[in-house]
Image (cartoon, rainbow, N blue to C red):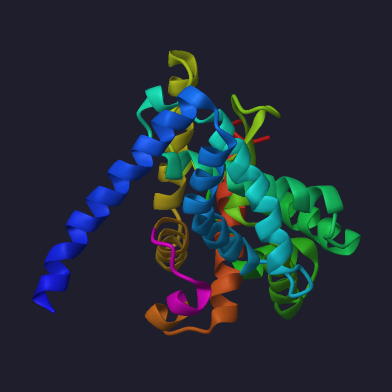
């Protein structure tokens, strides 16, 4: 047993050296055979990202479709990855894979119009209350402003959460990506930038986001941290906090509303 444990780090190092060698040869030759090897090696990343996104989507959205969308992102990442930038390919690829999946989901426009309308009304109410109160509004205050019962408000949270409209991955900012936008979640995860000007803007947004998270109520702060930084599922977070998975989902939606509203108020989010 101890022999196996001692062998694992060496095997991992050897594996890393081999993939780096394949990368270098591919960048020189542009061989399709080498490209296929790289895609196959990193394909588990696609399944991982698709699984994370799938957890926030309705059951009628097939995991196989998300994986297929993500593979286009992985292929694009392999084509465009610049080894001289000294960043991990995994970090770069995850951004591309997420983007490809989200772009395809938007293209098919699967979110019902009623949910989109409810989301807009909730966002507007939340932002108006936040400006007026200079703090995050309570559920009771939001419900009163929208003229709905607290039960109806929780129902809206659930619908928005199941549609992923409020997921951090869906928030967009103006950045230097191909379509002029970048998922806000990638601002948390990625420190890369193309030029000094973008680096300053990127850091400004990172700092604003961290400050906003720090101002969340304690339980919502924990949920955001565990879900987006530590990668725990809603069910796992519920077990940690001693609440239901449904309540975790509602609180995550409310926390995202706060972050979205705060960044809009300081003109960092479109």
Occupied quadrant, residue 67: bottom right
The front one of 47 and 183 is 47
Hey, which residue is sitting farthest top in the picture? 196
Please, is residue 112 above or below residue 210 in the view?
Answer: below
| Placement of the N terminus among the 4 image quadrants | bottom left
Residue 255 x, y percent position in the rendering: 55, 59
Q: How many marks?
A: 0
Please indicate, yes or no, whether residue 28 appears anywhere in the rendered image.
Answer: yes
Q: Is residue 33 left or right of 16 when viewed as pictured?
A: right
| Placement of the C terminus among the 4 image quadrants | top right
Residue 46 x, y percent position in the rendering: 56, 55
The front one of 151 and 111 is 111
Magenta stretch: give its range.
230-237
The front one of 89 and 267 is 89
Please indicate, yes or no, whether residue 94 appears anywhere in the rendered image.
Answer: no
Residue 166 x, y percent position in the rendering: 66, 57
Occupied quadrant, residue 159: bottom right
Occupied quadrant, residue 178: top right
Q: Residue at x 88, y 63 (%)?
A: 114
Q: Residue at x 52, y 43 (%)?
A: 93
Does residue 81 show up magenta in the picture? no
């Amino acid at each position: 047993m101890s022999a196996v444990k001692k062998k694992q780090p060496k095997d991992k190092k050897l594996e890393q050296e081999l993939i780096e060698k394949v990368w270098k040869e591919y960048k020189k030759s542009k061989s399709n055979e080498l490209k296929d090897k790289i895609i196959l090696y990193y394909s588990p990343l696609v399944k991982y990202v698709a699984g994370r996104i799938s957890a926030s989507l309705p059951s009628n959205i097939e995991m196989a479709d998300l994986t297929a969308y993500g593979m286009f992102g992985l292929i694009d990442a392999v084509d465009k990855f610049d080894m001289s930038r000294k960043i991990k390919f995994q970090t770069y690829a995850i951004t591309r894979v997420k983007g490809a999946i989200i772009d395809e989901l938007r293209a098919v426009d699967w979110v019902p119009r009623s949910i989109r309308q409810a989301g807009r009304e909730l966002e507007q109410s939340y932002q108006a209350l936040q400006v007026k109160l200079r703090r995050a509004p309570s559920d009771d205050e939001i419900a009163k402003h929208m003229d709905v019962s607290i039960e109806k408000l929780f129902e809206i949270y659930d619908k928005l959460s199941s549609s992923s409209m409020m997921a951090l991955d869906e928030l967009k900012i103006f950045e230097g990506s191909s379509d002029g936008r970048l998922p806000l979640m990638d601002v948390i995860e990625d420190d890369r930038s193309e030029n000094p000007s973008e680096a300053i803007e990127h850091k400004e947004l990172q700092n604003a986001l961290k400050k906003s998270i720090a101002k969340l109520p304690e339980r919502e702060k924990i949920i955001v941290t565990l879900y987006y930084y530590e990668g725990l599922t809603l069910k796992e977070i519920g077990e940690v906090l001693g609440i239901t998975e449904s309540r975790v989902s509602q609180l995550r939606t409310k926390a995202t509303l706060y972050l979205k509203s705060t960044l809009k108020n300081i003109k960092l989010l479109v």
